[in-house]
Image (cartoon, rainbow, N blue to C red):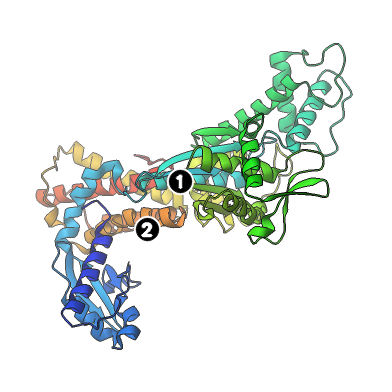
Amino acid sequence: MPQGMIRQEIERLVSEAAHEAREEGKLPSVALPEAEIERPQRPDHGDYASSMALRLARAAGAKPLDLAQEIARHIKPHAAIGDVSVAPPGFINVRLSESWLAGQVDEIRAAGQSFGSLPLGEGRRVQVEYVSANPTGPLHVGNGRWAAIGSTLAHVLAAAGYNVEQEYFVNDMLTQVEVFARTLYARYQQLFGVEAEIPPDGYPGEYVIELAEEIRNEHGDRFLGPREFGPDPPPEFRTIGLNKMLDAISADLAEMRIHYDAWFRESTLYGPDSRYEKAMALLRDKGYVTQKEGAVWFTSSALGEDKDNVLIRSTGNPTYFASDIAYHYDKFLVRRFDEVINIWGADHQGHVSRLKAALSAMDVEPSRLDVIIGQLVTLRRGGEVVRISKRAGDIITLREVLEEVGADACRFFFLTRSADATVDFDLDLAKQQSAENPVYYVQYAHARICGILGLGRERGIEYGDGDVALLTHPAELALIRKMLRLPELVELMARTREPHHLTHYALELATVFHDFYEKCRVVTDDVPLTKARLKLVEATAVALGRTLSLMSISAPERM
């Protein structure tokens, strides 16, 4: 049985028991609900529970407790099941066999870095697009949070059996990009004593001056020419400035351990026979394009939207919405992703429904697009909110936070809450070397694990033949139970698209391990038990290491 599938196996056994009881006349001849195995809120009730009898009671016209007892009697023996019981008002509780639990230690060790992987996705192609910040300035901490969420979700989906591609959409045709280029060009000219004015809506941050200095150092005054160009930079200067900004963004993301499969430029959507032209033609053919007020409109109201939306302005320029339609035409109808996940900032909330309406108009099932709206980060230093940036003026840059606390703390704290909730990030806490700092606490657990394994090596203990049946202490079994939660968690996160559960699981696993460490000395004069416990510790290294790797957080061997 693949790792982590025991829940499905118990679900199957409960479902088969109910069908068998019905065939024998022990249950009424009515449609049976799904078994739906869950984790009980109270551990003393068992490892798994089914409320099937409660959901069956009304249709069956019987007491749920009586139905539960009948289903429980028909559950077939299984190596993983130690005990089946029934509890009011009608729950079927299943407790795992302790001998089976102990045997999972060797299964986890054998799985190694594939522990937690599942065939759920069956190779379906999923694209995860995230951050995609405008290339007009450095990334802010909110971008960093979406980067942590997006990349971790991509890792989780890959572990769940999906074929995942990560992408950054480069908005290189925005009005803001032109304003950025003019600002950069004005700063460049000023370096040569030219009285050039910053555009009224330009970018005041020091990073623009730094980029201008880089261009001057590399290219000298070649972009001044025999005369000044005025506010509009030469095309080559614009390209160089845009690429430098993208290089800076890419460097910040690399520091966060983010590496995309593709950087997709908006400008590639346009041109003769382009994806933009094909997407617009498709909408026209479907009857969803009209002209009014001198502009071209998408008649989204015909698809249930409150209002129609402009595709091409009266100036002849396409809107951002039109670009997004063309981009998603490319995602679904050209590159043929089975599913697409976009992680957007809260200011894009209103854009979701109209984009899904456009997909529907192009005969793409809207449910194939999942848009996660990410909330921002509140930075604190102790009790005080941090608001001032050294380089960007009005935002706190991701680079500043990375330089202060490091990538591990950034990724962990960014992932502590669901995407739709604001994160309070305490910079002082993130730097503490104490159990109060969750990152330190989890990484210290991994370092302690490695220390124990190192001690075993120093003592020359070969534990490959260790008998895991000796693992019977409650703290040992609790640790195994917690490790076995990881595959289930991968499945849950892949279905809900909520990778923040990993941080909480990492803390729980570290806590259970520390408890085991306090109660069960590993290396002792009892050689057989030492070998068994070294196997358990190695399995914990696998489970905790995999958890950290899914978050792209380092697993130190010493601290």
Mark 1 / mark 2, whichever is N-terminal? 1
Q: Position of residue 90 (x, y in %)?
A: 29, 82
Q: Position of residue 345 (x, y in %)?
A: 62, 50
Name the residue at the right extreme.
195
Within 10 Å of disc 1 (Cα), the crowding (few <14, some 14-19, many 20+) is some
In this picture, residue 311 sits left or right of residue 56: right
In this picture, residue 330 sits left or right of residue 441: right
Residue at (38%, 41%) from the top-left corner? 555
Contact flag, marks 1 and 2 (Cβ < 8 Å): no
The quarter of the picture where the C terminus appears is top left
Does residue 427 appear anywhere in the picture? no
Nearer to me, 217 or 471: 217
Determine the CA span between mark 1 and mark 2. Answer: 34 Å
Residue at (64%, 62%) from the top-left corner? 304
On the image, numbered disc 2 is attached to which residue?
508
Nearer to me, 31 or 114: 31
The amino acid sitting under disc 1 is: Asp
Quarter-of-image position of residue 31: bottom left
Does residue 251 appear anywhere in the picture? yes
Q: Compared with residue 188, is residue 206 higher up or lower down, i.e. above or below?
A: below
Q: Position of residue 401 (x, y in %)?
A: 59, 42
Q: Position of residue 96 (x, y in %)?
A: 21, 65
Residue at (32%, 68%) from the top-left corner? 36
Say which mark, if any, is on residue 338.
1
Residue at (74%, 33%) from the top-left corner? 206
* Secondary structure state at the residue bearing disc 2: helix
